[in-house]
């Protein structure tokens, strides 16, 4: 089966002869082999491992994304960020830790932004209240 792993800016893996693949979603690890039923899942931060027809192993760390199996002959992975390496230990420890740190930083930034938006909305609501009795509200 053909495996394609892509990010918004690049094609990271294009392997036409994959005979087995392993990845992880929220429910845990799973495997895909040629002939697999159509399948769609959201990947977690994980290492996608695959074996080619010649027996060579390949590894690609992904920062979440989606995995789609089509017709049992194609597997497409779309992710925010990916790194290919033959060193599985490095991918599992260094790269995945970096991806997790980035994701936590982004989550914290989104939370901060949401809190600022909520504070602004509360201020606007307080300003627009009909029971407001200052000189600006009385003239409306």
Image (cartoon, helix red, strand yellow):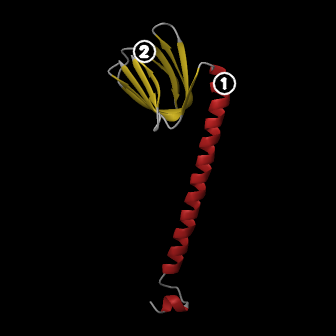
Q: Going 46% across and 28% down the picture, which residue do you hit?
A: 5
Of the two numbered discs 1 and 2 in the rendering, the one whose residue sits closer to the viewer: 1
Q: Is residue 130 above or below residue 36?
A: below
Q: Is residue 87 above or below residue 12?
A: above
The quadrant in which the N terminus is found is: top left
Q: CA distance from mark 1 to mark 2?
A: 26 Å
Q: Is residue 32 above or below residue 116?
A: above
Which residue lies under the disc numbered 1?
Answer: 90
Q: Going 65% across and 40% down the picture, which residue do you hit?
A: 101
Count the marks: 2
> Percent position (x, y) of residue 12?
49, 28
**Residue furthest front in the image:** 10
Q: Is residue 89 visible?
A: yes
Mark 2: few/some/many CA within 10 Å (<14, 14-19, 20+): some
> Percent position (x, y) of residue 130?
47, 84
Q: Going 37% across and 21% down the picture, which residue do you hit?
A: 74
Q: Nearer the viewer, residue 134 or 8?
A: 8
**Disc number at residue 109?**
none
Q: Is residue 87 above or below residue 5?
A: above
Q: Going 36% across and 15% down the picture, which residue do you hit?
A: 35
Mark 1: few/some/many CA within 10 Å (<14, 14-19, 20+): few
Give the mark nearest the N terminus, 1 or 2: 2
> Percent position (x, y) of residue 107?
59, 48
**Disc number at residue 33?**
2
The quadrant in which the C terminus is found is: bottom left
Q: In the image, is 34 to the left or to the right of 136?
A: left
> Percent position (x, y) of residue 123?
55, 74
Q: Secondary structure at mark 2?
A: loop
Q: Secondary structure at mark 1?
A: helix
Q: In the image, is 108 to the left or to the right of 72?
A: right
């Amino acid at each position: 089966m053909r495996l394609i792993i892509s990010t918004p800016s690049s094609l990271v893996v294009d392997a036409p002869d994959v005979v087995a693949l392993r990845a992880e979603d929220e429910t845990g690890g799973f495997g895909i082999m040629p002939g697999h039923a159509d399948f769609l899942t959201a990947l977690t931060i994980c290492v996608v491992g695959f074996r080619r027809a010649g027996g060579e192993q390949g590894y690609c760390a992904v920062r979440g994304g989606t995995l789609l199996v089509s017709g049992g002959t194609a597997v497409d992975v779309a992710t925010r960020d990916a790194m290919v390496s033959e060193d599985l230990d490095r991918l599992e420890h260094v790269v995945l830790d970096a991806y997790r740190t980035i994701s936590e930083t982004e989550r914290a930034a989104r939370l901060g932004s949401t809190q600022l938006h909520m504070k602004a909305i509360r201020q606007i609501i307080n300003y627009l209240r009909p029971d407001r009795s200052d000189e600006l509200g009385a003239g409306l």
